[in-house]
């Protein structure tokens, strides 16, 4: 019997042993288009933000600098006005009061503020508490107006940091203060109130007004007090006062004590009754409205009204 030999090709044999090949063909490779290059964009953004930040810093610095300068000017103006008003109250002349105002203003102003105050910035006059207005006057002046300024005209404007960007390198400012004191004059004044003192407790004080009417204040218990017309008598000129304390008395009416007339000046007027026993020593000082006093007698008050 003859033998038949069957040979297999190596290629066929390898394929028969390997895993069956996948019938799925790989899909095409998809490439996404690249966007525009953005290198350097962050630099522009940072530059923009830096400009904004520097501008805000310069602006806030300007606001703070202007506020400090204005506050300093106002404080100097206040001190000058108060000092001048006090000077007038103590009987100084207007020239003396003006010199006092200039001295106090300069004491409270830094040298860098330049010519912020001049003699013409100190004005004297009268203050109307009803209308809140200042009227310049040389006679019977009891109010002082002080104006301080930092301007280009005075060659002392405030330097501006942010303003340089807007072509405004300087800032100008002006402040005003008004102080009121008691008028000091030998001439007849319109007096709307009276300050009364006694060595005994006050019990009644009666005011007499220029129109002949009276107003009584009862139930008092202190040694002194300031009295002026109220209600229908508000603002009336006081021409005389009756002071009831201790055992002093008069025949002018029930509860009417010692009579003191307004002499037409701002001096202290002493009563006629002698000091001794139950008879008190009383005084009266007639003044315009808004004046305050101390226990020791007349003290010209000084206060800011603006």
Image (tube, helix red, strand yellow):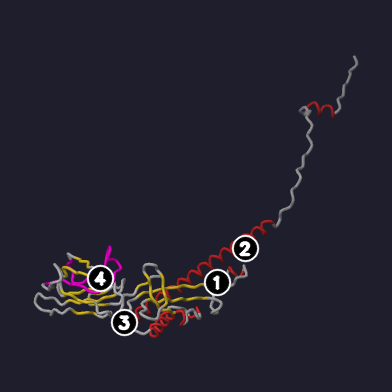
Query: Judging from the image, what secondary structure is the residue with disc 2 in?
Result: helix
Among the 4 quarters of the image, the one containing residue 217: bottom left
From the image, state whether disc 1 or disc 3 is nearer to you.
3
Q: Residues within 10 Å of mark 1 (few under 14, many from 20)?
A: some
From the image, state whether disc 4 or disc 2 is nearer to you.
4
Question: Dots 1 and 4: beta carbons under 8 Å?
Answer: no
Q: Is residue 210 above or below residue 103?
A: above
Work out whether mark 1 precedes mark 4 in sequence or the reverse, and give the earlier one: 1
Residue 187, labelled with which disc? Answer: 3
Residue 209, labelled with which disc? Answer: 4
Q: Quick one: which residue is furthest to the left in this view?
A: 277
* Label 1 – label 4 distance at C-alpha: 53 Å
| Residue labelled with disc 1 | 171
Query: Judging from the image, what secondary structure is the residue with disc 1 in?
Result: strand
Residue drawn at x 29%, y 66% is 234
Work out whether residue 190 can be spotted: yes
| Residue labelled with disc 2 | 51
From the image, state whether disc 4 or disc 3 is nearer to you.
4
Foreground residue, 199 or 156? 199
Q: Quick one: which residue is furthest to the right in this view?
A: 2
* Label 4 – label 3 distance at C-alpha: 19 Å
* Label 2 – label 3 distance at C-alpha: 67 Å
| Residue 207 x/y as whole percent | 22, 70
Residue drawn at x 74%, y 51% is 36
Work out whether residue 226 can be spotted: no
Residue drawn at x 26%, y 80% is 267
């Amino acid at each position: 019997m003859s033998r038949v030999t069957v040979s297999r090709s190596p290629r066929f044999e390898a394929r028969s042993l390997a895993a069956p090949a996948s019938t799925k063909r790989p899909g095409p490779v998809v490439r996404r288009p690249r966007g525009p290059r953005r290198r350097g964009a962050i630099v522009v953004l940072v530059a923009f933000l830096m400009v904004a930040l520097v501008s805000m810093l310069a602006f806030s610095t300007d606001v703070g600098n202007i506020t400090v300068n204005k506050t300093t000017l106002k404080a100097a103006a206040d001190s000058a006005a108060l000092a001048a008003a006090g000077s007038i109250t103590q009987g100084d002349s207007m020239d003396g009061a003006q010199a006092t105002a200039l001295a106090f203003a300069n004491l409270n102003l830094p040298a860098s503020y330049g010519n912020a105050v001049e003699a013409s910035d100190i004005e004297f006059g009268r203050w109307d508490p009803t209308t809140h207005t200042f009227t310049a006057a040389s006679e019977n002046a009891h109010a002082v107006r002080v104006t301080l300024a930092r301007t280009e005209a005075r060659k002392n404007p405030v330097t501006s940091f942010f303003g340089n960007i807007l072509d405004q390198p300087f800032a100008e400012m002006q402040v005003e203060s008004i102080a009121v004191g008691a008028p000091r004059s030998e001439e007849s004044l319109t007096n709307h109130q009276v300050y009364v003192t006694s060595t005994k407790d006050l019990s009644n004080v009666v005011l007499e007004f220029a129109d002949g009417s009276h107003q009584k204040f009862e139930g008092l218990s202190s040694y002194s007090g300031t009295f002026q017309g109220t209600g229908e008598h508000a603002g009336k000129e006081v021409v005389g006062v009756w002071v009831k304390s201790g055992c002093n008395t008069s025949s002018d009416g029930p509860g009417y004590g010692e009579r003191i007339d307004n002499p037409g000046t701002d001096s202290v007027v002493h009563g006629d009754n002698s000091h001794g026993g139950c008879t008190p020593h009383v005084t009266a000082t007639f003044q315009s409205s808004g004046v305050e006093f101390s226990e020791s007698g007349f003290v010209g008050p000084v206060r800011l009204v603006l």
